[in-house]
Amino acid sequence: MEKIKHKIMVMSNKGGVGKSTVAINLAYGLSERGKKVGILDADLHGPSLAMMSGSKGEILSDGSGKIIPFEINQSLKIISLALLFKDQDNPIIWRGPLKMKAIKQFVEDVEWGELDYLIIDSPPGTGDEPLSLIQLVANLDGVVIVTTPQGVALLDSRKAVNFVKELNVPVLGIVENMSGFICPHCGTESELFKKGGGEKAAREMGVPFLGRLPLDPKIAAAGDDGRPLVGETMDSPARKNMIGIVDEIFKMLSK
């Protein structure tokens, strides 16, 4: 961790809000700015970042107990439990102590080399795993919190903000995902899950609002194909907004 300049954790207090989508696109977006980036997939029960990044290699050891991450390309590395199992359908049936040991190994025993950024995809919730990650990762620059606009998700995201503040870690901001649906045929936007709730929560809680991502079939297609949206050249409102979110975080940490 001493060779890593900036460490960012992406979290949510609720599953299914697009946390991993934001994490992988943030990592790719920063690498496209000429930065060396590592991706730590700490979502042990649902490690999806290997698939979303198109990683099909395996994690190796250097013989001294250090873990060597898989290199996606010259500027991107990833560590994920998904790269340890040949059968991706096998569930991780672990109790707390074993999960904590795995997270500790991911933080302390991975030989990242020199990185500009480490993006940590945390499991949803405010329990053992995110708590351990924040306590183990020294000098965490901050946390990006992902939510959807409807009230149930916002209730959980507000708890996530207070969780991070309670641990004296900066909240880099809130991302509002699934904020409106862009019709792929006519381009009309519909508010399926309301809109603006994440921005309102950020304003009320005194934390930055990083931007909103509309529901866009291109996001799902890019993730399934292992080609994150920011790395594509397609004209997409979601891609444009995601690049804006990456720019905002990049400027924030460059200061």
Image (cartoon, helix red, strand yellow):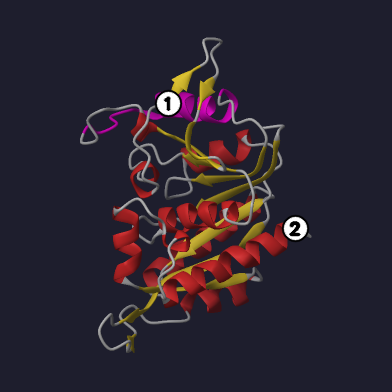
Q: Looking at the picture, tell me which residue is in the foreground, 55 or 202.
A: 55
Does 113 appear above or below 202? above
Classed neighbour count for the residue bearing mark 1: other residues with Cα under 10 Å, few (<14), some (14–19), many (≥20): some
- The spot of residue 123 in percent (x, y) is 43, 45
Does 151 appear above or below 96? below
* Magenta span dominant secondary structure: helix
Is 99 magenta? The answer is yes
In the rendered image, the quadrant that contains the C terminus is: bottom right
Please name the residue shown 40% across and 66% down the image. Answer: 153
Real-space CA distance between mark 1 and mark 2, rounded to the nearest whole angstrom: 31 Å
Classed neighbour count for the residue bearing mark 2: other residues with Cα under 10 Å, few (<14), some (14–19), many (≥20): few
**Rendering quarter of residue 88:** top left
- The spot of residue 236 in percent (x, y) is 41, 75
Does 202 appear above or below 31? below
**Rendering quarter of residue 233:** bottom left
Q: Which residue is mark 2?
A: 254
Amino acid type assigned to the residue bearing label 2 in the image: Ser
In the rendered image, the quadrant that contains the N terminus is: top right
Amino acid type assigned to the residue bearing label 1 in the image: Ile
Asked if residue 178 lies left or right of residue 86, the reply is right
- The spot of residue 219 in percent (x, y) is 35, 65
- The spot of residue 214 in percent (x, y) is 40, 75
User: Which residue is most to the right?
Assistant: 255
Q: Looking at the picture, tell me which residue is in the foreground, 101 or 107.
A: 107
Q: Which residue is mark 1?
A: 59
Please name the residue shown 54% across and 79% down the image. Answer: 200
Asked if residue 204 lies left or right of residue 154, the reply is right
- Mark 1 and mark 2 in contact? Answer it, CB < 8 Å: no
Task: Compare marks 1 and 2 and give the one earlier in the sequence.
Answer: 1
Magenta residues, start to end: 90-109
